[in-house]
Each structure stands twice: as structure tokens, then as C-alpha cells.
């Protein structure tokens, strides 16, 4: 029964009985890990506030073999991302990114380190970015890529033709864009401007430290939000509570 150490970010937390909590982490080495923080709801808990949602730190946990639920022995806080917690919108979006990671089945263990660092960079950027929704769209695109669901944005997913017209259609079930000849293949496909397609292609591969260089119009924001929201619903097969909350802000 080994004791494990790894860097981790808190992506979910809920009460267990009167005094405990179950914490879900995203870790560098093990991907998602669920573990019990014994006594963490007591006023004088040894964990203090270290296990708050979105916190990043060094986790020590006792791994029960063949079990899904382990035991937290220690969590040494590295960054609580205070500027996120001090701002209502930033907190809401941070919770959404965490819930998206929690709700999505990942294709393989190889993605673990990349997903962890993506989450870490996204939270660091979320502490100071001016265009919070654009950060969320960039995260969605890069996370979907790491999870094995990258949308095809360069050619038509049905006939592989390179696009010519001003508008193409985005199809969640086909996993990308359809040209004008093929958009009848999916009645649920929705039109999207070429400008928004180009922006999505750039956001798929950019470095988060350059986010401030991107400018998105109101149309870009509306289109990206709509198509990515539908695409994520298609793949997660569940409604994200924090996403509904953001849509009603
Ligand atoms: Zn086509």
C-alpha cells in the first residue's frame, strides 16, 4: 500500500458525513485522483483552507490498491490563485474549467501531464487576463485536443475539401467543419464565419502567455461560444452546472 506524492490541482470538493470531505484532484502523475480529507470540515482542521477548489499544491496521498477513493495525508499549498478568488467572474470561469476537466473522459494516460500543465497555465492567465471568455474558448479547444476530440478545422470532415466560401458549417457529431456541398449531411450543423474558424485554429495551438495579443469581435465570441458549447455537450453527454451558470450571467 504505497504513499504517493505528486503535484495536484483541486477540481472538485464535496462533503462526506459531518466532518470529512471528498476531494477530486487533477495530478501530474496520476491524472484524476479522488481522496478523503479526514476531519477537513472541522474548524481546527490541519488542512485549514488549503483544499479549496482550484488550489494548486503538493499532494501526499495513501493509495488503496484497486480502490477509486484514497486518503489525503498532506497537501502543501503552492498557489491559491488569490486574484481569481477575489473576482466573481474569474472564480465562475475557473470553476467551469475545473468541471470540464472533471466531466470529460480522457483518451489515455499520456495526456495527464499536458492536461495538468494546461490547467495550471490557464489558472495563471485567468488571474490577470482582460478577455476571460476568450481564455475559456482557448482552454476548451486545447483541452479537447489533449482529450482526443480535437475538432477538424482545416478541411471539410466529410469530403476533405479546402474551404472557399465566406461561411462554413460546424457539426458536433462529425467532429468539425462541413463545406457547402456537405452541410446537408447533418441537420444540426450550424453556420460559422471563416474569421471565427481562423481564430479557433490559432487558439488550438497558441501559448497562453500570448493571449493578450488576440482580439476577438462580438461575432467571434458568439460563434465560438455556441459551437464549442454544442461540441462539448456532445462529447461529455452531460450538462455542466457551471456552464449553465455562466450562460445566465
Ligand atoms: Zn465537404
Image: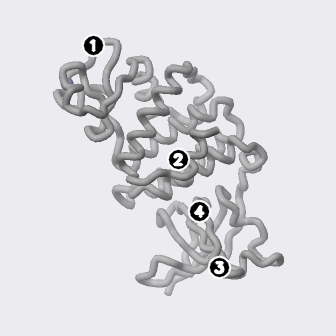
> Of the residues under marks 4 and 2, which one precedes in the sequence?
4
Which residue is farthest left? 159
Q: Exactly how many numbered labels are in the figure?
A: 4
> Of the residues under marks 4 and 3, which one precedes in the sequence?
4
> Of the residues under marks 1 and 3, which one precedes in the sequence?
3
Q: Is residue 153 visible?
A: no
Q: Which residue is mark 1?
A: 164
Is label 4 or label 3 in front? 4
Using the numbered discs, state the Cα–Cα distance from disc 4 to disc 3 in whole angstroms.
Answer: 18 Å
Q: Position of residue 127 (x, y in %)?
A: 70, 41
> Of the residues under marks 2 and 3, which one precedes in the sequence?
3
Give me the residue at 19% from left, 31% from top: 185
Mark 4 residue crowding within 10 angstroms, few (<14) / some (14–19) / many (20+): some
Which residue is farthest top? 165
Give me the residue at 50% from left, 51% from top: 240
Q: Which residue is mark 2?
A: 118
Q: Which residue is mark 4?
A: 12
Answer whether labels 1 and 3 touch (C-beta < 8 Å).
no
Answer whether labels 2 and 3 touch (C-beta < 8 Å).
no
Mark 2 residue crowding within 10 angstroms, few (<14) / some (14–19) / many (20+): some
Write down the quadrant of residue 201 in the picture: top left
Mark 1 residue crowding within 10 angstroms, few (<14) / some (14–19) / many (20+): few
Judge whether 107 appears above or below 76 on screen: above
Give me the residue at 43% from left, 34% from top: 204
Using the numbered discs, state the Cα–Cα distance from disc 4 to disc 2 in whole angstroms.
Answer: 17 Å
Judge whether 62 appears above or below 152 on screen: below
Using the numbered discs, state the Cα–Cα distance from disc 1 to disc 3 in whole angstroms.
Answer: 58 Å
Secondary structure category for the residue under label 4? strand
Is label 1 or label 3 in front? 1
> Of the residues under marks 1 and 2, which one precedes in the sequence?
2
Using the numbered discs, state the Cα–Cα distance from disc 1 to disc 2 in whole angstroms.
Answer: 33 Å
Amino acid at each position: 500500500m504505497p504513499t504517493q506524492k505528486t503535484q495536484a490541482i483541486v477540481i472538485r470538493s464535496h462533503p462526506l458525513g459531518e466532518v470529512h470531505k471528498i476531494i477530486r484532484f487533477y495530478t501530474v502523475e496520476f491524472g484524476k485522483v479522488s481522496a478523503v480529507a479526514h476531519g477537513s470540515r472541522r474548524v481546527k482542521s490541519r488542512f485549514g483552507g488549503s483544499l479549496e477548489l482550484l488550489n494548486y499544491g503538493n499532494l501526499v496521498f495513501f493509495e488503496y490498491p484497486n480502490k477509486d477513493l484514497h486518503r489525503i495525508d498532506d497537501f502543501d499549498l503552492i498557489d491559491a490563485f488569490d486574484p481569481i478568488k477575489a473576482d466573481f467572474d474569474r472564480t465562475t470561469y475557473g470553476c467551469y474549467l475545473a468541471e470540464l476537466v472533471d466531466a470529460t473522459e480522457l483518451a489515455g494516460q499520456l495526456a495527464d501531464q499536458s492536461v495538468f500543465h494546461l490547467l495550471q497555465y490557464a489558472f495563471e492567465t485567468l488571474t490577470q487576463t482582460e478577455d476571460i471568455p476568450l481564455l475559456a474558448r482557448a482552454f476548451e479547444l486545447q483541452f479537447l485536443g489533449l482529450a482526443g476530440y480535437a475538432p477538424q478545422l482545416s478541411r471539410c470532415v466529410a469530403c476533405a475539401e479546402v474551404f472557399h466560401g465566406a461561411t462554413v458549417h460546424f457539426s458536433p457529431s462529425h467532429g468539425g467543419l462541413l463545406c457547402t456541398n456537405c452541410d446537408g449531411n447533418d441537420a444540426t450543423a450550424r453556420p460559422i464565419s471563416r474569421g471565427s474558424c481562423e481564430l479557433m485554429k490559432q487558439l488550438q495551438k497558441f501559448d497562453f502567455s500570448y493571449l493578450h495579443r488576440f482580439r476577438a469581435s462580438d461575432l467571434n465570441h458568439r460563434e465560438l461560444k455556441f459551437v464549442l458549447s454544442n461540441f462539448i455537450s456532445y462529447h461529455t453527454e452531460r450538462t455542466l452546472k457551471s456552464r449553465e451558470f455562466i450562460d445566465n450571467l
